[in-house]
Each structure stands twice: as C-alpha cells, then as structure tokens.
Image (cartoon, coloured by chain):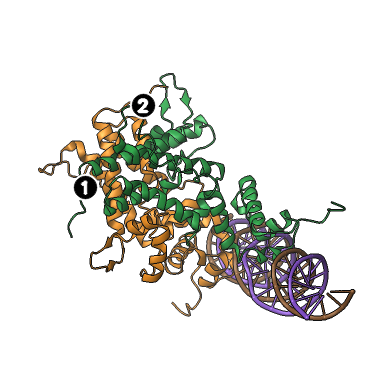
Chain colours: A green, B orange, C purple, D brown
Amino acid sequence: MADQTRRERLNRPRVLSAAVALADVEGLDAVSMRRLATELGVVPMALYKHVADKDELLDGMVDVALGEVPAEIPDRAQDDAGDGTSAEDGWRSAVRTRILAARRIQLRHPWLRRALETRTTRTPAVLVYLDALIGSFRAAGFSDPLTHHAMHALGSRIWGFTQDLFEDANQPPPDPASLAALAQHFPNLVAAASVAVHDDGTVVASGCDDQFEFEFALDLLLDGIAALHRQGWLPPRR
Amino acid sequence: MADQTRRERLNRPRVLSAAVALADVEGLDAVSMRRLATELGVVPMALYKHVADKDELLDGMVDVALGEVPAEIPDRAQDDAGDGTSAEDGWRSAVRTRILAARRIQLRHPWLRRALETRTTRTPAVLVYLDALIGSFRAAGFSDPLTHHAMHALGSRIWGFTQDLFEDANQPPPDPASLAALAQHFPNLVAAASVAVHDDGTVVASGCDDQFEFEFALDLLLDGIAALHRQGWLPPRR
DNA sequence: CGACATGGTGTACGCCGTACACCTAGAGAG
DNA sequence: CTCTCTAGGTGTACGGCGTACACCATGTCG
C-alpha cells in the first residue's frame, strides 16, 4: 500500500489485451512491438518474455477477440417456440445466431478480419468456434460431406466478415461531376452502387446497409443449404 | 547493333511485370522495392521514376493480373444452344463463366488475393471487371437493388477466391496420434475436415477438391439469386 | 551548342522485428 | 540471514523496409 508507484509486472494477458486495445483504437498497423512496448511503459524486448514473436502476439489477439463472446452457446435455440419454426430448423437458427454473434465481435474489433486472414496456425478459440458451428450441422443430421461443403460455402462469412471486395467504390458522397464521368465508363457499376437515382435527378447516396447485406447473403446460403439437406443431398459419385 | 550490352531502359510495364513475375515465384512478401530493384539490375530509388510508391506498384500488379484474361467477354453465352438452357439463363452462364475465368487467373497468381484485399483504391481493371459482371445481371432484367444484393452476396467470391478461413487445419497428412488428440477436443471439426473416415479405419486424407468446393458454393449462390429473380424479388419496404 | 527533360544513383532517415548479453528483484533453500 | 536461482526488464546492435532529397548521365530538340 505504501509507495506503489512501481509499475505492475507484465504478463501475457496484459500484453494481449493492451495489443487488442491498441488495435481497436489505432488499427492493426499501429500494433508494432515497439509501439506496444511504449504503450505498456516498457522496452520493446520486454515483450518477448511473454510472447515468442509477433506472430504469436497476433495469434493471441485473435484468441482474445474470438473468446470474447461465443462463450454463450445458443445451440438448440427455438426448439420449443410454438410458432412456425420446427425443431428441424434448430440448426439454422443456431448457426445463424452464432455467426451473427461473431459478426458483432468483428464489428467491435475491425482488425480481426485482417488478423485472422494472415494467421496460418489455427488457435484454440478458432478451433472451438469451428467445432461448435460444425456441431450444429451434424447434430441436425447433416452428413459429413454436406457439412463440409456447407462450411466451405459459407466461407469466411462464418466469421461475420462483410467480404466487400465489391465496395461501393466511392466513399465520399458522389460528387456529381466525377460521378457522371464514372457513369460514362461504368454505367452498370454506378447503377448498382448508388441504388437509388431518383427521377428528380437527386442521388440517394448508396450508404448501403451492411447489416442487411450480410444477413441477405447469409440467408441466401442457409436457404440453399437447408434445401439440399431437406432433399437428402448426396455427394456426386466419382 | 554494336555493343548493346547496355541494359534496356526501364518503363512502367517492365517494372510491373517484373513485380508480377517475382510475386508468382517467391510470393508477395518477396516483392520489396529493394528486392525488385536488384531483380531489375537497378538501384531501389530508380523504381520511383515509374511508380509513385509501393501502393501504386501493388495497384499496378493487380491491374496487370486482372487484365490478363477477362478481355474475352463471354456475355450472352449459350443463347442459341438448342438444349435445355433458355435465353433466360444467359446471365447465369455469363456470370459463372466470368467468375471461373477470374478464378483461373487467381490460381495462376496466388498473391492476387492478398493484394486485392489490401488495396483501397479501385483500379481500372477492377472497375471494368465489376462493371461487366454487374452488366450481366442488369441485361437479364435484374432490378438494381437485386443486382446490388447479388453482388454483395457473391462477395469476394466474384474474384474466384476460395475463401478458406475454414481450412482443413492440418495440412500434413493427419498423423494418427495427434489426430486422435484433436478428435477428442474437436470431434465435429475432425469429422467434417477429413470427410472420409472409412469403416476399415483408414482415413482418406481430406485433400478436399478446391475446385469442387468453389463451384458448389458458387452454384448455391447463383441458384438462390436465380430463384429470387424468377419470383420477382422486391426490396423490403422501409 | 546549349537547355531541358527523362531516368538512374548515392546517401540518409526513421521505422520495423528480434538476437544476444546483461542486470535486477524477489522467492525458496540451507 | 545469506545464497542461489529464476522470471522479467534493459541496452545495444543488425539487417531489412519504404522513401525523401540532392545529384548526375543521357538523349532530344531548338
């Protein structure tokens, strides 16, 4: 209690959560060993007493973020909700709920996508998540091959990534002049991007609803998967 | 013709294609300004006479790769193939063909995925590709909103990426011992990864067919999109 | 012939990850 | 109570990175 100006001793969890906090605020690029060290009031090499190298730091960050929410296990949801949903559809809401939970944490930690994408080793939290998701399919009687393909079809969508390599190309409100120029060369792109070009000529800035897009795509996939399951999909014979 | 030992003068195309070649052989990480310079027998700073900075180099590489194949425009395919496919389905095969073409070039340039993902500016070839793809939908009478959602639903799949954040977790042939350990903690994951664990106990190493997985997922999405189009999907009123 | 643009050079700066040798403080054993 | 051991923090150094800036070489054109 006396003169506790002394800095608390470092440990792995403190290092990891400091890294997560830093990435949350300043982005993944700000997370360098040196920067993180000064953030913790410590010399860069001190970190190496707690993580083997930067790769392991990133792995740890991913695990921290991923372990944040999915502790709750929403499996077998609405089995007994007396409405239209039958027990048959339990897997669907379980998968959907879990993925949307992942999406929420991904929105809280925008760096997670890039971090996860560059990881090559699969850390515990990743495996836990995957296993749980796959479990929902299998518990509903999905064959292993269909489960396998379903997971592939969902792809990185399982992490809640909005995989917008198709970005709306012009974040700044579409300055009419340059938009006109763009529209000349890429009429289709402009039409699909800024969905609402009204009769009065005003452009309702695309500002497309990411959450809607995500659920739209997710449901499209889940519908397709459900249909295959219902009709007893079998792998094509070789 | 005399003593032409003199090195050819550099220019932007030469720089870009050298970068592409280097990335093809040694991966994207090998493409540093310094390394690329020595590859071209030139001092690092010389490159800056041809590209503004590294970002622009990457942009250029993407454009080179993307401009490689889709010059062919397979739109309106099998309109007049007297078989089961109706003209109504023209968009489907056009979209499918174009995406599979993109996939082929992505397989030829494995670095393309990461490069495209880190790009923030949309370069000409990217816009051309997007515009063409969107054009296929619109030409088939897709509403702009549905086209928009369809593009989002396809997501980065339009580039032919196999978006395997769900990787089979163990590239090395599944050493039985560690596999057993893994199976204990993650039974579902192991079951779905190594699809074929036969009755005789032998494990047919997953070695899952990427091309099949890709087309499976793509067709799932296209089926869903086709259904929505057929039944005249309308955006939910706000 | 001289000006000028184009393109290649050399040096330098501030970042990065991290190897390696060192020091320090506290805990447990004698 | 000291002695030793160890976990954790330090300092220095190296080789890589992107790139700013001043400079020089070469060809073209007036």
Q: Badge 1 is on which residue?
A: A233
Image position, residue A77 (x, y; %) = 39, 37
Image position, residue A224 (x, y; %) = 28, 41
Q: Chain of mark 2?
A: B
In the image, A93: left or right of A117? left
Of helix, strand and loop, which one carries label 1?
Answer: loop
Nearest the viewer among A161 and A100 is A100
Image position, residue A93 (x, y; %) = 37, 37
Asked where in the image residue A195 lies, by quadrant, the reply is top left
Name the residue at the left extreme. Answer: B82
Q: Is residue B54 above or below residue B225?
A: below
- Tell me what residue is drawn at x 39 percent, y 55 percent: B164
In the image, A213: left or right of A89? right
* On-image quarter of the N terminus of chain B: bottom left
Amino acid identity at mark 2: Pro
In the image, B15: left or right of A217? right
Q: Badge 2 is on which residue?
A: B235
Nearest the viewer among A79 and A238 is A79
